[in-house]
Image: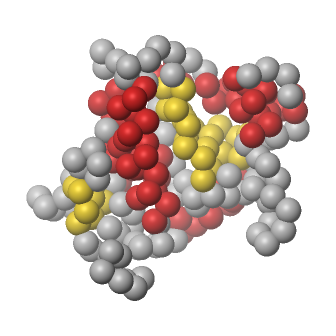
């Protein structure tokens, strides 16, 4: 995948916007690398506001397709979002408008999995297996994103907890090439704006 001087290869260590050192495990997991820095910036802006809900939405893993099935969106919350029932709110809204969601839980194993194996990096971006062959393959990226962005400093025990939910639309986005489904827009609009 190293097609130029601005590219990276597996086993390279990259410092994220948050200052966290990330060892690249697989260049095919580039989506989480791009989202981590953007999420870090949103986190920095969100701490200035009240009642903020942060979401990442991506066709991130084949594991989500296996776990929830075709046509369903996987959603998972960090601690503050789970305390406010964000996933349940989005799932109920999706049920009301025909945009089905399945709730997954981010566990300590998902955070521990991405801990860097040596003293040179803080985090490991992913292993070199496909997500569909990795236990908890669609929850692990959420754990990585939380840690790589610095959102782990804004959990339930923080002075400034921030609600964050990761939405994996790999199984619900529709065929490619083809006509996209539009998921998760109907459910998110219903949940946070009002009747679609």
Q: Is residue 42 left or right of residue 117?
A: right
Q: How is the image coloured?
A: secondary structure
Tell me the quadrant of the picture where the C terminus can be found: top right
Q: Is residue 150 left or right of residue 95?
A: left
Tell me the quadrant of the picture where the N terminus can be found: bottom left
- Is 10 placed above or below 166 here? below
Q: Residue furthest bottom?
A: 3
- Is 37 placed above or below 83 here? below
Q: For the point 40% across and 29% down, which residue is it? A: 45
* Residue 135 visible within the image: no
- Is 84 placed above or below 11 here? above
Could you say where residue 129 lies in the image, as x and y percent from the top left? 46, 73
* Frontmost residue, 18 versus 62: 18
Could you say where residue 39 lies in the image, as x and y percent from the top left? 43, 42
* Residue 102 visible within the image: yes
Could you say where residue 113 lies in the image, as x and y percent from the top left? 35, 53
* Frontmost residue, 83 versus 195: 195
Q: For the point 71% across and 32% down, which residue is it? A: 188
* Frontmost residue, 21 versus 113: 21
Q: For the point 75% across and 30% down, which residue is it? A: 189
């Amino acid at each position: 995948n190293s097609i130029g001087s601005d590219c990276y290869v597996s086993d390279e260590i990259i410092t994220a916007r948050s200052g966290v050192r990330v060892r690249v495990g697989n260049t095919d997991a580039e989506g989480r690398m791009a989202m981590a820095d953007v999420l870090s910036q949103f986190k920095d802006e969100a701490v200035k506001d009240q009642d903020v809900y942060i979401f990442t939405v991506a066709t991130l893993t084949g594991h989500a397709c296996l776990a929830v099935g075709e046509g369903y969106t996987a959603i998972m919350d960090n601690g503050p979002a789970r305390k406010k029932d964000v996933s349940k709110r989005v799932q109920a809204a999706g049920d009301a408008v025909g945009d089905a969601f399945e709730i997954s839980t981010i566990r300590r194993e998902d955070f521990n999995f991405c801990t860097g194996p040596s003293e040179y990096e803080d985090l490991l971006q992913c292993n070199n297996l496909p997500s569909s062959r990795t236990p908890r393959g669609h929850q692990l990226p959420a754990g990585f994103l939380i840690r790589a962005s610095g959102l782990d400093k804004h959990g339930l025990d923080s002075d400034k907890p921030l609600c964050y939910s990761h939405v994996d639309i790999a199984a619900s986005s529709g065929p490619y090439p083809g006509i996209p489904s539009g998921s998760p827009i109907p459910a998110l609009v219903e949940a946070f704006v009002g009747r679609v």
